[in-house]
């Protein structure tokens, strides 16, 4: 049995049904094998970054280990940014790259490089298969490492000669692993005891809550203790229903602003996330002075990593939250229940005031030209069906988008982690492959869209019915906001115009760009047309691009 056959049969035995990739010469053994394994579909991308982001979002949407296939050193280099995003998102991912013939390694062959070292900083494990006998055991371990908590990408280098070597070491079937750790009862008792003493608890819910399907249990917990629920600043999912009155918003991007947002809380419960991924330095703690901090994680690596805890619990997320609910209920007195109800009522009143404030702001900006972000996101919501899946890379429109859409549970929302742009359109490819029966709408800024514009070709090539929405303000608006923060934080003393942050001269024309890749599109200038255009795009059940003119930074 040749190494390439071991590879393909190992993938099949582990449930792989799609490979996201960009082909190259050293990938010939894999590509030529596809005809013999029709149960695996190769989703072709025109750039390695698109392939990896698509695979990453597919892994997030399905909960299964995805596979991306790249081409030697330049191809892996092209994908490093997307691989970083997958690493930060904890996507279970096997990334392979063809490597030059090992018999040539001393002569520095064309396209050759140390792929293992190149991938190592942004993967959980990076390895090269040195001989065909290693193929099966390395792939078995790769799937195991990728799915160990916290999940993440593994890189495997596949030299072309090793793929053609004969081996008697046959493919190894998937491990049967039961990893759900039962939380320590003593930790749950301590957490419940601290919650019972709290007069104003707050919950910060991370992506692991969403991935574990624990929305309903988290709602029960939040209502039982009268807690506000916050999201991480950068998130891949919506771990709590955003229409619920206890939902607040996503937290800011530095310790001082997080502390300000949580200022009324005397207890913070952290659930399933890295906590916190700041953008800007600010002195001091993320938490108000004297606040009790509890953390529940599925990985010991994250537990108490950044913050001292009053109670830290390691355990399966769904089990831990469910048992914590039971523990709280067993201790709940009538007096505590009434206090929690009062907190819930205060949160409902706060939510109503914020919604009214957004309505007033929306009304004031309704007739602005070009359209305000608030108007655009409201019109998008009006035009899209309730079961639409949103893949979000709107960045500076994300707050308005969050106010306009209600995300009910896992699978309604996907976002990119790590802060690198160019994940949105590419990620939508993977999401649509994962959920072909739901309408998928990718919303991106124009700057972000240009990082992965080749995704349009892949959508057309595979007839993936994705609606690509480009919010076109012809600038890197987020960078302008960040310049303002930098000037304030560092007292830079400069007030001259923003440098190299405008996407003009010439203007980008996304409708023509899409047409060149086989995707029909429309540019919308009048906001009155947005809802009908996006509704028609979804109804068309084909790849379609909608470019919407939006206001720039004011």
Image (cartoon, rainbow, N blue to C red):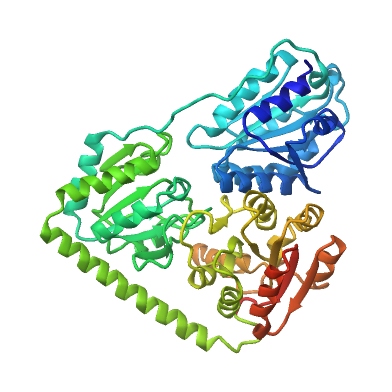
- Identify the image quadrant of the N terminus: top right
- Identify the image quadrant of the C terminus: bottom right
> Residue 23 lies in what quarter of the image?
top right
- Above-or-below relation of 478 to 495: above
Residue 45 seen in this snapshot: yes
In the rendered view, does 353 fall on the left or right side of 419? Answer: left
Residue 237: x and y in percent read 51, 54
* Residue at x 24% of width, y 61% of height: 200
* Residue at x 65% of width, y 57% of height: 424
Residue 292: x and y in percent read 25, 50
Q: Nearer the viewer, residue 293 or 223?
A: 223
* Residue at x 30% of width, y 56% of height: 220
> Residue 263 lies in what quarter of the image?
bottom left
- Above-or-below relation of 440 to 13: below
Q: Nearer the viewer, residue 217 or 361?
A: 217
> Residue 374 lies in what quarter of the image?
bottom right
Residue 286 seen in this snapshot: no
- Above-or-below relation of 179 to 83: above
In the rendered view, does 286 fall on the left or right side of 252? Answer: left
Q: Nearer the viewer, residue 343 or 473?
A: 343
Residue 289: x and y in percent read 26, 55
* Residue at x 80% of width, y 73% of height: 507
Residue 138: x and y in percent read 64, 21
| Count of numbered circles on the image | 0
- Above-or-below relation of 520 to 153: below
């Amino acid at each position: 049995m040749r190494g390439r056959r071991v590879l393909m049969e190992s993938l099949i035995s582990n449930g792989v049904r799609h490979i996201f990739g960009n082909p190259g010469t050293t990938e010939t053994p894999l590509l030529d094998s596809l005809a013999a394994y029709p149960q695996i579909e190769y989703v072709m991308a025109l750039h390695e970054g698109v392939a990896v982001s698509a695979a990453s979002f597919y892994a997030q949407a399905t909960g299964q280990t995805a596979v991306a296939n790249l081409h030697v050193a330049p191809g892996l280099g092209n994908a490093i940014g997307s691989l970083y995003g997958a690493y930060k998102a904890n996507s279970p991912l096997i990334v392979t790259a063809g490597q030059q013939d090992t018999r040539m390694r001393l002569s520095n062959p064309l396209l050759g490089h140390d792929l293992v070292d190149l991938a190592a900083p942004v993967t959980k494990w990076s390895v090269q298969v040195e001989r065909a006998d290693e193929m099966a055991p390395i792939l078995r371990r790769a799937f195991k490492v990728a799915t160990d908590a916290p999940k993440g990408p593994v890189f495997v280098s596949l030299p072309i000669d090793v793929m053609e070597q004969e081996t008697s070491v046959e493919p190894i079937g998937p491990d049967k692993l039961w990893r759900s750790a039962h939380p320590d009862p003593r930790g749950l008792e301590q957490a419940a005891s601290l919650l019972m003493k709290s007069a104003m608890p707050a919950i910060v819910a991370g992506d692991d809550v969403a991935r574990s399907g624990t929305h309903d249990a988290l709602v029960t917990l939040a209502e039982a203790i009268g807690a506000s629920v916050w999201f991480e600043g950068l998130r891949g999912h919506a771990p709590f229903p955003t229409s619920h009155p206890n939902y607040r918003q996503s937290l800011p991007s530095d310790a001082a602003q997080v502390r300000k947002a949580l200022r009324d809380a005397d207890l913070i419960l952290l659930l399933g996330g890295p906590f916190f991924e700041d953008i800007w330095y600010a002195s001091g703690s993320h938490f108000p002075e004297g606040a009790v901090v509890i953390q529940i994680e599925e990985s010991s690596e994250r537990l108490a990593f950044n913050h001292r805890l009053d109670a830290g619990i390691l355990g399966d997320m769904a089990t831990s939250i469910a048992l914590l609910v039971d523990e709280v209920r067993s201790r709940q007195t009538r007096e505590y229940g009434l206090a929690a109800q009062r907190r819930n009522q205060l949160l409902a009143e706060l939510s109503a005031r914020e919604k009214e404030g957004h309505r007033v702001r929306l009304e004031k900006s309704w007739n602005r030209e070009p359209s305000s972000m608030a108007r655009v996101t409201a019109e998008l919501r009006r035009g899209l069906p309730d079961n639409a899946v949103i893949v979000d890379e709107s960045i500076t429109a994300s707050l308005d988008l969050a106010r306009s859409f209600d995300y009910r549970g896992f699978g309604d929302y996907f976002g990119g982690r790590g802060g690198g742009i160019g994940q949105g359109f590419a990620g939508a490819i993977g999401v649509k492959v994962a959920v072909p029966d739901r309408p998928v709408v990718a919303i991106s800024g124009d700057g972000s869209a240009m990082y992965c514009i080749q995704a349009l070709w892949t959508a057309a090539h595979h007839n993936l019915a994705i609606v690509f929405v480009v919010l076109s303000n012809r600038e890197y608006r987020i960078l302008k906001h960040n310049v303002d923060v930098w000037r304030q934080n560092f007292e830079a003393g400069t007030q001259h115009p923003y440098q190299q942050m405008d996407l003009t001269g010439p203007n980008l024309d996304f409708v023509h760009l899409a047409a060149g890749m086989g995707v029909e599109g429309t540019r919308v200038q009048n906001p009155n047309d947005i809802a009908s255009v996006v509704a028609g795009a979804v109804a068309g059940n084909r790849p379609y691009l909608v470019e919407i003119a939006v206001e720039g930074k004011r």
